[in-house]
Amino acid sequence: MPAEFGGVGRCIEPARIGLFGSVAWPPLAAKRSVEQRMSDFFQFLVSGLTVGSVYALVALGFTLIYNASDVVNFAQGEFVMLGGMVTVFASAAGVPLPLAALIAICIAVVVGLLLYWLAIEPARGASAVTVIIITIGASILLRGIAQIVFDKQFHKLPAFTGDAPVDLFGAAIQPQSFWVLGGTAVIVTLLYAFLELTLLGKAVLATAANRLAAHLVGINTRTVMALAFGGSAAIGAVAGVLITPITLTSYDVGTLLALKGFAAAMLGGMGNPLGAVAGGILIGLLESFGAGYISSTYKDAFAFIVILVVLVALPQGLFGRRAVERV
Amino acid sequence: MPPWFGHRYVTLALLAVTIGLLPLFFPSTYYFRVASLVWVSAFAAIGLNILMGQAGQVSLGHAGFFGVGAYAVAIGPTHLGIPVWAAVLAGAVISAGLAHLVGRPILRLKGHYLAIATLGLGVLVALVITTESRWTGGPDGMSVARLTLFGWRASGSSTWYWISGGLLVLGAWIALNLSETPTGRAFRALHDSEVAARVVGIDVSRFKLQAFVIASVYASIAGSMLALMNGFINPDQAGFLHSVELVTMVVLGGLGSVVGSIVGAAVLVTLPQLLTVFQEYEHLLLGLIIILSMIFMRDGIVPTISKPLARRSRA
Amino acid sequence: MTILEVTGIGISFGGIKAVDDVSFSVSPGQILSIIGPNGAGKTTLFNVVSGVYEAQQGSVVLSGEDVTGYAPDRLAALGLSRTFQNLQIFQRMTSVENVMVGRHLRENCNLFADLFRLRSVTRQNRATREAALVLLDDVGLRDSADEIAGSLSYGACKRLEIARALAAEPRILLLDEPAAGCNAVETEEIDGLIREVAGKGIAVVLVEHDMKLVMKISDRILVLDRGKTLVEGTPSEVRNNPAVLEAYLGKRGAREAARA
């Protein structure tokens, strides 16, 4: 089972501080006072929003690529992994943190472009399932390379503005959480501005709406698709840099992230960027509150239960549109 | 090529002969173990092939059923005291039941939605197995009692070679049978055009479900065999990576081809064994194989080889 | 004694009413043609009647039974067969297998027997194959019986679909542009085939653009325009109807029809 994204259930290893490690886990049976319940609630709320932001960014990356090329990119989680791991190793080699992060993002973008040019582009015309399998293969390949180039340990980054927890209604919030939430908001806003307000962004939207038509009006769809992969990789890498101080990183954090990010994208309606962000936040909150109030050992299961329920009951997601098959 | 070449009895005979004669080339018992692993994986792959190759559905969570069968023979005798053969049966029944229950709503989906739904299912099964450590031994796995039938204890790599080989022939026979029957034609029809299949009177959801259940039973029995063979089982056998490996075997070998599934299993099982020196490179290699074969040999090994042969014979 | 009674069918897609209050009926052995310009809603109407789409208004009654909203496989069991305008043959199966699948409802389908391919299954396979070969012969495709359907020409595929539709021994046959892509000789053969089918007492409803064929073989014609019924009547009534001439046939089409 791939290492999960920090967390409570298997928190036996000392290195796995995770998102909830600094909080004494409230046993459900014990009596809690109103203030304690309130502080629990806000603890869960902020953790949920924080981890949800990462899912949101992964889902956003998925959506960008899916919109431009109809590809469901399983290697999305690996971009997040690269963001974290490269930054860790670069700064360990003496590079100052901001520069290390920048290097990580650039490397992720290069990997994203290579993924498109070497694995996706040559398989043009293949069925949807074949392409999913290719991206799964790419994710496994990247993981294989990572375990050789880096190592199999967990790694941490120092929090950007220190570790001193901030008090919010009695809950102890790590300042890094605010960096994650803020960073996500900035990325979403920038992406929105890019897509709606720039010509290149419009070209991306046009390619998403109808690739052939976009091609016919002179848009270089291949450039657009490469851009989508590169952009997705950058977004993923930034998410990785932001979250590593809280949840650590290792060579195989990518898989579970990709799966949950995909659940988020599905929840919001495959192809809907704002839906993807909403979906990510929702799944993060679901996980956090579910782990806190229902069962912490099955924390990871919530996202997958969500996937199954959404697919069965609402295949178009919360905000998507029903498609009609033409015969 | 003579007209009887593709006939199923010829295929089965060749398979049986291969299984029978292969041990003559084995320098040590280690090879029996590897070959048994190939037979077991091929058995699971053949089942998955019925679902993916014939009925045209996709399952990225198939290892979940494999895990159910494996843990059934672990938990049954150890915690519940039931005989091993009954545990194998129970595992198959539970897999079939799970497939039936979850299959109905899931199989309405298509393409990547179906892929993700099955993926979610597989991950959930693996999660439950990993978490319920009181029963399953958790992430470290648990040991499995040996198979005893009428007092005879099945152990030793060569014993398992023959058991798994025999079961493979049986599994291949059933899969080959199915192809030219109303059920098999219904599978292939709904694969090519669901709407046309409907219009001709085929209850598409019923047949998709049948394929799914059949495939799940194959996987469960394969899982049971592996657990009994190794005397040990861990949750990785039910995990996402194993599901991906199973799908790769089927697609690499050639969707729809029973022989292809066996070839695909052989490639994916033996390659890492050949490179035990490069243990670390396992992921890298698997990923590379998947990508390259999907790009350059989209139809799979067996169809890619047999198509030009067929063309040449007709010329 | 009508076998199919379609009343007031209405269906919209995202605000556009594709079919608006269309009604018609067919009796056994009768040939009804549905004509109209592209986008008139002919195939959509077919899709509603054959259960592929669900009607939002109206009803479909088959042999006295209200089958509105029934799924296509249920309708097939009740004797309704159809072909598709944009071809839905089973590309990777052989021609004879395509037609054999058409006989699915006439076969005994038992999973256990099939898994072990018992002798009963082998016997049934042979019988089904024989029946399928006869049908292939009827549509002139006997020689391509064991060829992969995907490699056949467009016209041949059209005929294959008809053979497959007939394999179920239907009581009513819906043909969506059976003569599209066919030359004059092939169209003649389709003409003969349709008459033969109707002669056996099967009701035939076809959507066609080939005016000569339509005027020649139809007992009745239904003209659609933009989802609504323009006129319904015998070929001569339709041919001389000014509204139809104006809206659809146009000057050229009218000349062609007059020559038929």
Image (cartoon, rainbow, N blue to C red):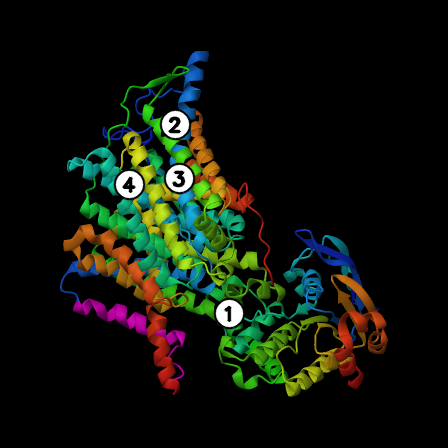
Amino acid carrying label 1: it is Thr
Residue at mark 2: A47
Badge 1: chain ID? B
Mark 4 or mark 2, whichever is nearer to me: 4
Q: Do labels 1 and 3 share a chain?
A: no
Real-space CA distance between mark 4 and mark 2, rounded to the nearest whole angstrom: 21 Å
> For the magenta stretch, what is the residue range?
B1-25
Residue B16: image location, x then y, percent: 30, 70
Q: Residues within 10 Å of mark 1 (few under 14, many from 20)?
A: many
Q: In this view, does A249 lie to the left or right of C157?
A: left
**What is the tally of numbered marks visible in this picture?**
4
Mark with earlier residue (2, 3): 2
Q: Which of marks 4 and 2 is nearer the N terminus?
A: 2
Whether residue B142 is visible to the viewer of this picture, yes or no, is no
Camera-near label (2 vs 3) is 3
Query: Disc 4 residue type?
Result: Gly
Marks 2 and 1, how far apart in space?
56 Å
Label of residue A57 in the image: 3
Give the crowd class for mark 2: few <14, some 14-19, many >=20 residues within 10 Å: many
To which residue does mark 1 refer?
B181
Q: Where is residue B178 in the image (x, y as percent from the top left)?
A: 46, 67
Element marked by disc 3:
helix
Mark 4 lies on residue: A83
| Residue B17 is covered by the magenta coloring | yes
Which is in the foreground here, disc 2 or disc 1? 2
Subunit ID for the residue under disc 4: A
Q: Which mark is residue B267?
A: none
| Left or right for A39, reference C40 | left
Nearer the observer, C238 or A25: C238
Tell me the element at label 2: helix
